[in-house]
Each structure stands twice: as structure tokens, then as C-alpha cells.
Image: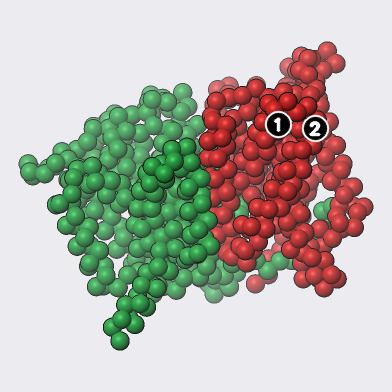
């Protein structure tokens, strides 16, 4: 059945090309969003603040995936693995070695950057579905690796590790949740600004050239291998920091929190938020945190199905995710003004 | 030496599971050029349907045939309703579609039949095969069925007009359309066949791994590994790949200390990555050349 002749194919577009300018928000809108993020915790309950922290953390992880997929056009269904590495790095450093929580984050970021960069090496040979497949396997393998008896001394095996929640420093009169929220917010903003600038830089242009046409990019002098692995590394690094923050916020890490389901949720968050639209990451994160709750309140057993149906609806009705909604909103506003 | 041959035999019998699954994976890859991440869940759902039929008192082989027909129809319906409109969308969107399907099927199965582990009958019995303790009659039957499916597919693609049309539609859609082949329906047919093969795989696997909504995850990863090893474009390669992966898994488990069942998935990961890096086309696949 397999013909001996070599097949020549013109490869289809893996990811839709998003122009650089369409990747971010305008200055005015950014300020409004920022103000909302800063002021809301002053008026809401602790549990909601905790959920908002989670949204920010997942938002970071989705943002990381967005840089990889929307920026450089590579797939990953394995982000949960890097998130897990980051979470475990923070947890182990804090609990086993007594390192300050804020200092564990850069370490988590660096370790995950290295892991992502290394995984990017074999991934270089792969594109499209093959890459999705390899990362899918990575995500399914990760919980088993974490459960290994060999690492149990550090990871705590199946039971996982309990992490203590940090108090607000300098005797600030705020609760742990509020402090953690602002701590996360600062890191999120820093990483968001950094990512925006990264995509606007020379490296960002190289990412996008690879995304739009790899062969053309390489003939223009872009070092494809370097930038593809770099995108993987940066993405994994940011995911790792998110993982570290996640471990601190949830106060617990265990192998079964980082299954393929989580990787799928992050992927879903990216699709819902709009591939290649960085502000959409927060929208996507809010979607993956709040919608399962809503789905469960509709029907306990069917939350997965509701999730899937919603994903199909997004693909069919608004294939560009939240970005499309934002654009339509903008046009409406413009018409209103006229 | 006896340990070695025994492990090879045991590997072949587990390999039959992966070979079944890999065949379904390759089938759909041939038809649509994508890996269907929901393949395992579709197979699981089919297996549950056959189980339900048997619970209602339908004899095994009648349930078997009915399930095949239902799965075939369901595969076509899924393609027509959900994936035909996405045919021109970016790959990312299609992968998202597969994942949505995965989630929907898994959740529905859990709701209808809940997550308790169920026994699944085998038509071949489970006594030792030819006096060997390593291969049971069920496993022998499973190997037989896999080879039978492979032969059937070979004859279908090689000697029937429909098979020829499907091959044409998959390899050169433009030209196929010009000679009057309805390529869009050929894709739907590919989905149907993949669903039916998956159903057979599920019904053969279920007596070994037991029936529950998450039974297919490990098997699917190994099926992917087998398909990648054999070459995603070759059904023959997929079956050989399945047996090789089974043997490999058993040998690694026996001879490398500290590697047991808890490392099952990482081994599959290592295998997939290694094959994709060293020989992306697999053992029997054809290389693909890209053009700007």
C-alpha cells in the first residue's frame, strides 16, 4: 500500500497568522484592565481572591503556551509537564531546603527553561500533529515519573508535598490570600510586559516568520533550530514560574494534579482566549477555572461533556476566540461613537 | 534463554493489543492526514455499547456485528457533522476538535456506565493456548483477529474499486476529484472504517485490561507509539510496530532493573520521541518532502 515514490506536499497552515500589532491591547484598555485587577480584591471575599489568584496563575501558563503556539507556531499538549516541574521545584525547595518562596520562582523558571529547551531539541524534527503527539505523550508520562520510588525522598511519592502559605512581609496588615494575590499580580504583569516586548523584538519577529513559513524564514537567514528551541524554552520557563506560584497558592503538589486533563485545559484556554492574542490568556484562564464549576452545577457527571461541547461551539462560532469578541466589540463601539 | 523466549511470547500477546489500536490510528491517518486523539475514547464507547447489548441478552457475535455496524455509522456521522466543516481550518483548530470529542465521549461514558471496572467476556476462552502458560486462547484469538483485519484491509485497498478510490483520494485529492471520485465521502468512509476497527480493538482489549471509561489512555499512547514505529502511512507497519512495541515493553521490564508497570507510559514516551527523531517516517512509512 505504501508507495515507494516520495510524496510531495505543500504543508497547510498549522496556526493562523496573527499580525504583531493584533497581539496586544491598546494603552487605554490595558489601564482599565489593570485598574480592575488591582481594585477588585479590596471589595470581594477571600475565596474569590483565591480564585482570582488562580486565574492569574493559569493565565500565565496559557500565556506561555500562546507564545509557543501563537508566536512560533509549535503545538504543545504537554504544558502540564512543565507546570508540574515548576510546582515541584518550588515545593521541594521550600519544604525540604527551607528556601524563601519568592526565591524558588526564578529557580523553577530556570529549571523549566532548561527542560523545555532540551525537549525542544527532539521536537525540532517534528511539526504539527507529530509535535502534538510527542507532547501528548510527555503529559501522560509525567505523573508516573513523579510517582517513581526513586525520587520519593524529594517528591513525597503518590502523597505529594504540603506547602506552607507565606505570610505578608514587613508586618503588612493584609491576609495571606490578599498578599499572595498582589504578589502574583506583580509577577504576572512583569511577565506579560516582558512577553509583549519579546514578541515585538527581533526574536519575536523570527518566531513569527517561522510560524508563517518555516522554509522561507530559514532562507531569509533565521536560525530556525535555535529560535524554535528558544520558544520552547521560554514557554516552559514561564509555565514553570506559573507552576511554582500554583504550588504556593494551592499549598499542595501531587502527581495526579498534573495529568493530561490539565494540559488539555491549558490548550483549551488558549483556543478560547484566541491563539496569538496575549490578553486573551486571562480570558482563557477564567474560562477554564469558572466554566467547569458552572458545568458541574448543570450536571455533576457531565462536566467533561459540557466542556467539550463549549469547545466545539467556540471553534465553530468564534474560531478566533476572545480576540474575535474584542474586535467585534471595538467595531460596535466605533459605530456608536460616529 | 528460556526466559528470553518466554518474554518474547508474552510481548507478542500484549503487542496484539497495541497492533489493533495502531491499525485504527493508521487507518484514520490515511484518510484524513491527522492523528485522532479521540480514537481511544471512540473505541471505548463502542466496547461499552457491545457490553450493554450483551447485558440485554444479545449473544456475543451478534453484539459484535451490531457494534461494528453502529460504530461505522457513528464514525461517519461524527465526520459529517463535526469535522467536515473544519476540513479547511488550521491544524490547531482540528486538534482542538479532537480534544473536545475526547472529553465529550469520556464524560458521557462515565455518566452512562459509571467508572467502576467491569468484566468483559471473551469468545475464545482464557485457558492456556497449546499448553503454554504465557499465551491464553484469548490472546491467540486476538492475534488471529488482528492479522485477519490486516489481511482484509490489504485486500480491500488492493483489489476493490472503493479501496482504490480511497487511496486516490488520500494521496492526490485534486486528481482524484478530476476523475470523478467523491473525495469528501471517502474521508467519511475512512472515519467509519477507523471507528469500526477501533471497536474491534476495544472489544479484543477489554477482557485483558477490563472495561472502564479510562481503559484506553495507556493503550492509545502505546498504539500511537506502535503506529509511529511502523510508520504512520503503513497499516502493515502498524501491526508489526504493535508487536515490536509489546516485545520491547516486556524485555525492558524483565532485563532493566527498576523498570516496572509504573514506568509504562514514560517508556512509550521515550519510544515515540526516539523514533520520531531517528527515523520520523517509521520502519515502513514513506518519507514526506515539503515544498514552499
Q: Which residue is mark 1?
A: B53
Farthest residue, direction bottom: A338
Measured as percent of width and height from the top left, residue B253 is found at 63, 24
Q: Earlier in the sequence, mark 1 or mark 2?
A: 1
Please report the residue visible at 53 percent of the width from the left and 40 percent of the height from the top. Answer: B107
Q: Are marks 1 and 2 in contact (CB under 8 Å)?
A: yes
Tell me if I can see residue A239 in this picture.
Answer: no
Q: Which residue is mark 2?
A: B62
Q: Nearer the viewer, residue A179 or B196?
A: B196
Q: Chain of mark 2?
A: B
Q: Nearer the viewer, residue A208 or B18?
A: B18
Q: Nearer the viewer, residue B230 or A222?
A: B230
- Would you identify the image quadrant in which residue A191 lies? bottom left
| Side (left or right) of A28 relative to A140 | left
Mark 1–mark 2 Cα distance, whole angstroms, equals 9 Å
Quarter in which the N terminus of chain B is drawn: top right
* Mark 2 crowd level (few <14, some 14–19, many ≥20, 10 Å Cα): few
Q: Secondary structure at mark 2?
A: helix
Q: Chain of mark 1?
A: B
- Would you identify the image quadrant in which residue B132 lies? top right
- Give the colour chain A carries in the figure: green
- Give the colour chain B carries in the figure: red
Above or below — where is B232 with respect to B148? below
| Side (left or right) of A168 relative to B169 | left
Above or below — where is B242 with respect to B290? above
Q: Which mark is residue A255?
A: none
Quarter in which the C terminus of chain B is drawn: bottom right
Q: Secondary structure at mark 1?
A: helix
Measured as percent of width and height from the top left, residue A275 is found at 46, 62
Please report the residue visible at 83 percent of the width from the left and 41 percent of the height from the top. Answer: B150
Q: How many marks?
A: 2
Amino acid at each position: 500500500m505504501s508507495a515507494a515514490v516520495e510524496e510531495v506536499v505543500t504543508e497547510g497552515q498549522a496556526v493562523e497568522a496573527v499580525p504583531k500589532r493584533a497581539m496586544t491591547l491598546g494603552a487605554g484598555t490595558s489601564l482599565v484592565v489593570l485598574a480592575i485587577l488591582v481594585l477588585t480584591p479590596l471589595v470581594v471575599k477571600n475565596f474569590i481572591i483565591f480564585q482570582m489568584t488562580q486565574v492569574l496563575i493559569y493565565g500565565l501558563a496559557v500565556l506561555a503556551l500562546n507564545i509557543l503556539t501563537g508566536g512560533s507556531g509549535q503545538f504543545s499538549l504537554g504544558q502540564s509537564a512543565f507546570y508540574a516541574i515548576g510546582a515541584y521545584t518550588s515545593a521541594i525547595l521550600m519544604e525540604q531546603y527551607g528556601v524563601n518562596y519568592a526565591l524558588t520562582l526564578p529557580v523553577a523558571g530556570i529549571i523549566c527553561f532548561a527542560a523545555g529547551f532540551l525537549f525542544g531539541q527532539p521536537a525540532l524534527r517534528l511539526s504539527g500533529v507529530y509535535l502534538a503527539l510527542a507532547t501528548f505523550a510527555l503529559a501522560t508520562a509525567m505523573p508516573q515519573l513523579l510517582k517513581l520510588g526513586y525520587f520519593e525522598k524529594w517528591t513525597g511519592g503518590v502523597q505529594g508535598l504540603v506547602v506552607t502559605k507565606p505570610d505578608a512581609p514587613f508586618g503588612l496588615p493584609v491576609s495571606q490570600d490578599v498578599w499572595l494575590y498582589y504578589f502574583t499580580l506583580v509577577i504576572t504583569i512583569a511577565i506579560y510586559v516582558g512577553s509583549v516586548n519579546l514578541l515585538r523584538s527581533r526574536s519575536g519577529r523570527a518566531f513569527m516568520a517561522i510560524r508563517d513559513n518555516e522554509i522561507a524564514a530559514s532562507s531569509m537567514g533565521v536560525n530556525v533550530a535555535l529560535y524554535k528551541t528558544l520558544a520552547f524554552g521560554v514557554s516552559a520557563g514561564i509555565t514553570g514560574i506559573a507552576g511554582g506560584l500554583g504550588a504556593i497558592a494551592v499549598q499542595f503538589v501531587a502527581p495526579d494534579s498534573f495529568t493530561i486533563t490539565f494540559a488539555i485545559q491549558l490548550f483549551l484556554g488558549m483556543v478560547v482566549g484566541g491563539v496569538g492574542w496575549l490578553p486573551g490568556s486571562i480570558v482563557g484562564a477564567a474560562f477554564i477555572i469558572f466554566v467547569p464549576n458552572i458545568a458541574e452545577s448543570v450536571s455533576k457527571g457531565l462536566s467533561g461533556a459540557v466542556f467539550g461541547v463549549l469547545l466545539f461551539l467556540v471553534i465553530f462560532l468564534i474560531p478566533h476566540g476572545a480576540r474575535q469578541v474584542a474586535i467585534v466589540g471595538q467595531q460596535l463601539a466605533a459605530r456608536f461613537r460616529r | 534463554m528460556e526466559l528470553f523466549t518466554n518474554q518474547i511470547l508474552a510481548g507478542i500477546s500484549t503487542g496484539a493489543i497495541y497492533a489493533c489500536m495502531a491499525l485504527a490510528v493508521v487507518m484514520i491517518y490515511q484518510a484524513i492526514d491527522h492523528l485522532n486523539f479521540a480514537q481511544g475514547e471512540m473505541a471505548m464507547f463502542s466496547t461499552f455499547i457491545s457490553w450493554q447489548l450483551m447485558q440485554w441478552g444479545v449473544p456475543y457475535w451478534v453484539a459484535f456485528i451490531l457494534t461494528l455496524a453502529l460504530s461505522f455509522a457513528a464514525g461517519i456521522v461524527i465526520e459529517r457533522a463535526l469535522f467536515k466543516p473544519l476540513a479547511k481550518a488550521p491544524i490547531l483548530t482540528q486538534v482542538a476538535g479532537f480534544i473536545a470529542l475526547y472529553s465529550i465521549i469520556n464524560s458521557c461514558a462515565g455518566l452512562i456506565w459509571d467508572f467502576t471496572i467491569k468484566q468483559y467476556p471473551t469468545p475464545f476462552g482464557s485457558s492456556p493456548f497449546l499448553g503454554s502458560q504465557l499465551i491464553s486462547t484469548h490472546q491467540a484469538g486476538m492475534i488471529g483477529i488482528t492479522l485477519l483485519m490486516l489481511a482484509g484491509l490489504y485486500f480491500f485497498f488492493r483489489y476493490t474499486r472503493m479501496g482504490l478510490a480511497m487511496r486516490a483520494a488520500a494521496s492526490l485529492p485534486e486528481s482524484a476529484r478530476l476523475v470523478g471520485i467523491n473525495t469528501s465521502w471517502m474521508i467519511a468512509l475512512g472515519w467509519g472504517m477507523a471507528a469500526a476497527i477501533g471497536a474491534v480493538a476495544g472489544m479484543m482489549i477489554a477482557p485483558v485490561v477490563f472495561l472502564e471509561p479510562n481503559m484506553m489512555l495507556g493503550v492509545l499512547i502505546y498504539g500511537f507509539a506502535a503506529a509511529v514505529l511502523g510508520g504512520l502511512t503503513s497499516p502493515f507497519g502498524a501491526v508489526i510496530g504493535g508487536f515490536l512495541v509489546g516485545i520491547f515493553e516486556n524485555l525492558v521490564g524483565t532485563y532493566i532493573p527498576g523498570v516496572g508497570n509504573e514506568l509504562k507510559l514514560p517508556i512509550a514516551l521515550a519510544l515515540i520521541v526516539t523514533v520520531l527523531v531517528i527515523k520520523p517516517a517509521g520502519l515502513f512509512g514513506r518519507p514526506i518532502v515539503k515544498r514552499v
